[in-house]
Amino acid sequence: MTTVAAVEALTAATTRPRPGKAIAVMPAYNAARTLEKTIADIPPGTIDEILVVDDCSSDNTVEIAQKLGLTVIRHEKNTGYGGNQKTCYRYALDAGADYVVMIHPDYQYDSRVIPAAIELIRLGICDVILGSRIRTRREALRGGMPVWKYISNRCLTLTENIALGQNLGDFHSGFRAYHRSVLETIPWEINSNDFVFDSQFLAQSVQFGFRIGDIPVPVRYFDEASSINFRRSTIYGLRTLEVLARFWLHRLRLWRSPLFQSTKLNP
C-alpha cells in the first residue's frame, strides 16, 4: 500500500459512521465571533449532535448557535466553567451519548481531530483522550501561547504526571473526549464549578482506573480565544496542587475524599 493510499484509508476509517452515538458539547461564554468557525471544521458525519451550553453570555452566542441548527441550553445565571460542563455532561448522558467530546467553541483548538479522538475510544484503546497543545516547545510558542503560560503548563503537567502516574503532554487542554462509562462512574457532579473542575476530573479518572491518552492538536492564540489571566492561572495552579494532595491522602487512606468515591450515575 502506498503512503497516499494508507492516508486515504486512515481518513476513511476515522470519518465513516461507527456504532454508538457521539455528541460534541461546547461550554460557551461570549463565543459569538468564533463559534461558527469551530463548527465548520468538524468533519461531516463524525458527530451525531452538537450541544452549546451558553453561560449567560453578553453577546449573541445563543442566536448564532440556533441559526446553525445546534442544540442550545442557556443558563440564566453564570455558573462558571465547571458548572457549564456539568450541564453539558448531564445532557449528553440523558441524550444517550456513547462518546462525548468537549471542545471550547473559541476556535483555539482544531476540531478536525475529533474523529481521531473518538476512534481511539471506540477501538477500546483509551477511555479518555486529551488534545495536547504542546507537541514541541517551538510549535506551542509559535502558535501564540504566552511564555509564562507555557512554563507554568510544563511545570504543572510534569507534577501531575508524576503524582498520577501518567505520561501526558498537556493536562490542561480544552479538548477532551470521553467514553460514556467515564461520565457514569466519576462523581463529577460534586466537583468545583470553577476551572479546577478539569484537574479534579482527570485525577478522578486515574482513581477509577480509566485509561487516559492524548493526541496532538494544533491551537491558535488570538484576542477572541478564551484564556484566564495570570492571577486566575495562579489560583488554578494552586488548587490543582491541592487536588493532587487530596488524591494521595485518599490513596494512602489518611483522609477519605468524596471526590474519589464512586456514586455511579444512571445505574
Image: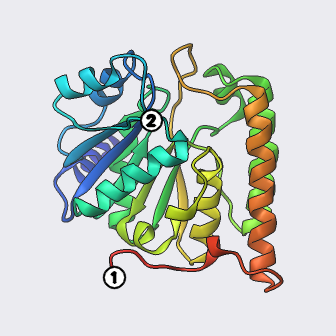
Q: Residue at x 25, y 21 (%)?
A: 63
Frontmost residue, 59 versus 233: 59
| Nearer the observer, 206 or 58 | 58
> Any mark on residue 28, and which?
none
Q: Nearer the viewer, mark 1 or mark 2?
A: 2
Q: Mark 2 — residue?
A: 77
Residue at the farthest front position: 76
Looking at the rendered structure, the secondary structure element under dot 1 is: loop
Quadrant assignment for the C terminus? bottom left
Residue denoted by label 1 = 267
User: Is residue 84 visible in this depiction of the protein?
Assistant: yes
Measured as percent of width and height from the top left, residue 59 is found at: 39, 16
Q: Which residue is located at x 79 percent, y 74 percent?
A: 248
**Residue 169 image offset from top left, x and y in percent:** 65, 49
Is residue 56 positioned above or below 48 on the image? above
Question: Does residue 47 appear to the left or right of 144 in the view shown?
Answer: left
Residues at circles 1 and 2 in contact by the CB criterion of under 8 Å = no
Amino acid on which the number 1 mark rests in the picture: Pro
Residues at marks 1 and 2, CA–CA distance in whole angstroms? 30 Å
**Helix, strand, or loop for circle 2?**
loop
| Residue 250 picture location, percent across and down | 75, 79
Which residue is depicted at the point 67% across and 36% down?
Answer: 136
Would residue 1 be seen by someone viewing this image from the given angle?
A: no
The residue closer to the viewer here, 189 or 173, is 189
